[in-house]
Amino acid sequence: MTPQVRKKGAARRLRLGLPKGSLQETTQKLFGLAGFDLRVESRSYYPDIDDPELECVLIRAQEIARYVEQGVLDAGITGIDWTLENRARVHELADLQAPWPNYNPVRWVVAVKEDSRIRSPRGLAGKRIATEVVHLTRRYLKRHGVRAEVEFSWGATEVKPPLLADAIVDVTETGSSLRANHLRVVDTVLTSTPRFIANREAHADAWKRDKLERLVVLFLGAIRAADRAGLMMNVPRDRMDAVLAILPALATPTVSALADEDWLAVNTVVEERSIKEILPRLRKAGARGIVEYPLSKIVD
């Protein structure tokens, strides 16, 4: 793949690498919440998007950082694990950790069979380790002053101990797959989250940097709103302190006057999971006309 040459007078475009595979569906959700209509056709690696200044390409997350460093892509979304594994020199724009599947933190861990004698990094000395992140694993071993044989694993890494490897370095979000294969975690090599990264030269370009910064505002605004909801209610003046004491606000609640001087309107943002617990308390404290409403973005 080589960068396309922009014709004189042609509209400028930002080329984005989007992760194909486990991160794909959630990345499409992120774009939707950010206000974009991103459509991925089956068998197509070039999604349609309702922004003429964006060109999207679906690529495995493992490769995105490398293509961003090379300038084939201006920017992309991939885990910090793959940026470090590729030793890619890129500009990080944002951490996109979000309360969605595959956008939560994941851990690369050293794991062994439950009955293994390996109990610490030192126990890996002279052992064979299978992993997809060879560089990260070697760097981890060097940090602990341990020498071991590290080999690349093409998949199904968790089934390799004890016959094909003494230990593995594998990725886990919940640990369920490791437990299902009777594996025990020895140590954490790296905790990773999705990142929005850019090519350094692209980020130095004024037009591209402005476009990237606008995307960051939209992405982070959508993520901040992901697990929050708005609440508005009417509160008697003499009950305001009691109501405000209940509200775990994202910021100071907005309080405004109503036509009836004995009442005030309150508007605030709370964690969605807390609503079922605080709504009855708010009503008991005197709030009335309580309305919960969804949020699409929160921009600081």
Image (cartoon, helix red, strand yellow):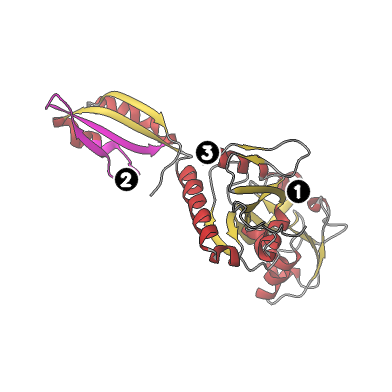
Within 10 Å of disc 2 (Cα), the crowding (few <14, some 14-19, many 20+) is few
Q: Which mark is residue 33?
A: 3
Q: Which residue is mark 1?
A: 182
Give the residues in magenta.
244-271
Q: Secondary structure at mark 1?
A: loop
Placement of the N terminus among the 4 image quadrants:
bottom right
Q: Tags 1 and 3 in contact by the CB under 8 Å rule?
A: no
Instruction: Look at label 3 and name its amino acid.
Output: Leu
Instruction: Look at label 1 and name its amino acid.
Output: His
Residue shown at 84%/57% (left/top)? Answer: 162
Q: Secondary structure at mark 3?
A: helix
Between marks 2 and 1, how big is the CA–CA gap? 46 Å
Q: Is residue 174 visible?
A: yes
Q: Earlier in the sequence, mark 2 or mark 1?
A: 1
Q: Earlier in the sequence, mark 1 or mark 3?
A: 3
Q: Does 250 lie within the magenta span?
A: yes
Within 10 Å of disc 1 (Cα), the crowding (few <14, some 14-19, many 20+) is some
Identify the residue at the far right of this view.
163
Instruction: Look at label 2 and name its amino acid.
Output: Ala
Within 10 Å of disc 3 (Cα), the crowding (few <14, some 14-19, many 20+) is many
> How far across and down, in percent of the image, does residue 95 sit?
53, 55
Image quadrant in which you'd find residue 128? bottom right
How many marks the image carries: the answer is 3
Q: Which residue is mark 2?
A: 251
> How far across and down, in percent of the image, does residue 284 sit?
26, 25
Above or below — where is 122 with respect to 289? below
